[in-house]
């Protein structure tokens, strides 16, 4: 028996995760890829292989189908075999298990959607090779050479993936292509109105290929909260806090459920409004009517919804539906892995990542969020605007805490978090791209790889018909007594909390950040750089005095000191200060909608 290091890669990531129109597609696409990878990992584990990545303290339980344990699409293991042919068999068995798991989901989806799909097209796509499966291995006899062998296997796998197995799709002329990614033919029969196929909602004219149907129908009947549910969560919490009666609106929503216009009780939805919150947006009612088999019946219900909402106080009308997408990623994880010298040390590393993934799901749920994916050092989640920054703080601190529990032979990695606040009715793919761009800014990826300028928090505002706002700063240690610290020394999340509280208490005029922007525009084309800094500094301080900030003496001194500190760097930093204040205003609006809570304590 010889020992080998075996690495597998499962895909395609684009088809299984990125292609999505709804949060349900995105969530189950992620779950689907994890389950397929989990089946491959379980095959290796059950045949005597020693998993390195993924790894947990209870693999027998965690690798069972349906467990909350997430498995990434790359698997690394030690295997004992009588030559390379047996290693190849281990790899093929893992691929068979992965394919079997995929076909199980496909059968489940077909069972639910049978009446609405074209069986011929379904069978054709089911017989195509949907899973990309690549493997590479190398003899591994000397544990002292683990780093070298692991790198060789990674290089071999990369080379193998470059020799992709292309299987040409035979598309049919005139057949609609998938609405998710436009690649494969739709397997759905033509439908003019919204359908409900055994609890699976399909909108009028929507086209889904086999993978799209599996995302929509497999994994149980539970739906996922829409982005609108998450965006309106602060407003719903605010209504509940004020004792507003929602029974009438819920009654009409129940009627809309019977017409398949909205979904009932999506997973993790706000308990006080257990429906698709799109029903609270009158601007969307025309779509309900256009897609319904009985438009007049839907129009009657939506008119009742409008009358019910008109009874609300004008300040209680639905807020503009903006939500936060949070994307977090560990910093320099590759560098940390590169210095690991043994499989056991790598297992400890993998186990730490598994612990973080499990804890991250709990953290996101605590902050009323919808967790799409937590795997290793990656987190993708949707959150209400007022909860996103505190959630990011807790994720960052939890990540750091886990790495300090053990002694490592490398500098503990950190977590950079990007938050993008965008309109819920933007295309879902765009919303996700905004979040990924924010995460790249949080990492400050433009800096040299050897620099220490990672470990960042970035917040971007993608307001419709307005330019993008953006702030980015490295995390600082959370201050237990922030009141005694200068604002410049606070962590960015605590300083945002300071501004939010002052805006909500009307201690700082809402025009203040716009006046700062006005100063920048006024001095934009000045050629005299010598006097520019002094002139801008004088004007900023003049605006502060003229605006008459309604602050305590202590807070006024803190604000003046912070502004003095910022404007030393001239117009770039004044712009940064203005955008920081504007970001705080955006978050403060969600705080007000939720009833004015601000637990920052600054």
Image (cartoon, helix red, strand yellow):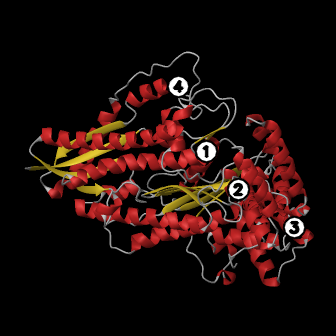
- Mark 2 Cα-neighbour bin, 10 Å: few <14, some 14–19, many ≥20: many
> At numbered mark 2, what does the secondary structure look like: helix, strand or loop?
helix
Query: Of marks 3 and 2, which one's residue comes earlier in the chain?
Result: 2
Instruction: Indicate which disc, 1 or 3, sits on the residue closer to the N terminus.
Output: 1
Res. 73 visible in picture: no
Mark 4 surroundings within 10 Å by alpha-carbon count, few (fewer than 14), some (14 through 19), many (20 or more): many
Q: Position of residue 420 (x, y in %)?
A: 65, 53
How far is disc 1 from disc 3 in space, using C-alphas? Answer: 39 Å
Residue, disc 3: 509
CA separation in Å, label 1 and label 4 = 19 Å
Residue at disc 4, secondary structure: loop
Q: Are circles 1 and 3 on residues that touch, CB within 8 Å?
A: no
Q: Which residue is mark 2?
A: 231
Q: What x and y, as percent, mark residue 247?
A: 79, 63
The numbered mark at residue 22 is 1
**Which callout, 3 or 2, points to the residue nearer the camera?**
2
- Mark 3 Cα within 10 Å, few/some/many (few <14, many 20+)? some
N-terminal of the two: label 1 or label 4? Answer: 1
Q: Residue at x 16, y 58 (%)?
A: 144
């Amino acid at each position: 028996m010889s020992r080998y290091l075996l690495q597998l890669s499962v895909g395609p990531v684009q088809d299984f995760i990125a292609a999505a129109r709804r949060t349900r597609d995105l969530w189950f696409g992620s779950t689907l890829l994890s389950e397929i990878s989990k089946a491959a990992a379980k095959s290796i584990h059950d045949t005597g292989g020693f998993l390195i990545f993924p790894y947990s303290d209870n693999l027998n339980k965690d690798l069972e189908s349906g467990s909350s344990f997430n498995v990434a699409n790359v698997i690394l293991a030690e295997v004992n075999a009588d030559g390379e042919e047996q290693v190849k068999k281990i790899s093929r068995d893992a691929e068979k298990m992965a394919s079997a798991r995929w076909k199980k989901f496909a059968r489940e989806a077909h069972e639910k959607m049978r009446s609405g799909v074209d069986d011929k097209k379904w069978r054709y796509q089911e017989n195509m090779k949907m899973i990309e499966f690549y493997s590479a291995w190398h003899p591994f006899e000397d544990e002292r050479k683990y780093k070298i062998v692991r790198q060789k296997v990674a290089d071999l796998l990369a080379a193998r993936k470059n020799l992709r197995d292309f299987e040409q799709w035979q598309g049919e002329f005139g057949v609609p292509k998938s609405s998710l990614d436009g690649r494969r033919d739709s397997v759905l029969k033509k439908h003019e109105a919204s359908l409900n196929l055994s609890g699976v909602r399909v909108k009028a004219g929507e086209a889904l290929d086999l993978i799209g149907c599996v995302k929509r129908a497999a994994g149980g009947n539970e739906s996922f909260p829409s982005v609108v549910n998450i965006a309106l969560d602060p407003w719903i919490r605010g209504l509940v806090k004020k004792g507003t009666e929602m029974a009438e609106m819920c009654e009409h929503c129940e009627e809309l459920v019977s017409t398949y216009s909205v979904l009932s009780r999506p997973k993790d939805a706000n308990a006080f409004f257990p429906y698709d919150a799109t029903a609270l947006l009158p601007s969307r009612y025309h779509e309900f009517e256009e897609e319904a088999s009985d438009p007049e019946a839907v129009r009657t219900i939506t008119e009742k919804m409008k009358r019910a909402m008109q009874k609300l106080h004008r300040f209680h009308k639905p807020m503009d539906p903006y939500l936060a997408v949070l994307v977090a990623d560990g910093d320099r994880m590759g560098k940390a892995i590169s210095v690991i010298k043994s499989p056991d040390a790598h297992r400890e590393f993998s186990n730490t990542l598994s612990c973080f993934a499990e804890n991250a799901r709990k953290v996101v749920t605590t902050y009323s969020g919808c967790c799409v994916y937590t795997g290793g050092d990656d987190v993708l989640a949707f959150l209400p605007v007022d909860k996103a920054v505190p959630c990011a703080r807790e994720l960052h601190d939890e990540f750091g805490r886990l790495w300090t529990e053990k002694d490592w032979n490398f500098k503990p990695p950190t977590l950079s978090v990007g938050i993008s606040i965008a309109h819920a009715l933007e295309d879902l793919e765009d919303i996700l791209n905004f979040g990924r761009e924010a995460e790249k800014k949080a990492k400050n990826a433009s800096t040299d790889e050897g620099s220490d300028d990672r470990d960042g928090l970035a917040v971007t505002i993608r307001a419709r018909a307005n330019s993008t706002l953006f702030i980015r700063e490295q995390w600082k240690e959370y201050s237990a007594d922030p009141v005694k610290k200068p604002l410049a020394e606070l962590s960015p999340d605590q300083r945002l909390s300071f501004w939010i509280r002052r805006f909500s208490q009307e201690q700082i005029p809402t025009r203040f950040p716009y006046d700062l922007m006005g100063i920048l525009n006024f001095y934009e084309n000045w050629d005299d750089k010598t006097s520019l800094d002094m002139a801008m500094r004088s004007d900023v301080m003049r605006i502060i005095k003229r605006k008459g900030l309604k602050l305590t003496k202590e807070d006024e001194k803190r604000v003046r000191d912070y502004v003095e500190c910022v404007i030393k760097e001239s117009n770039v930093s004044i712009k940064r200060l203005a955008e920081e204040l504007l970001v705080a205003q955006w978050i403060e609006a969600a705080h007000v909608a939720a009833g004015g809570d601000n637990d920052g304590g600054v």
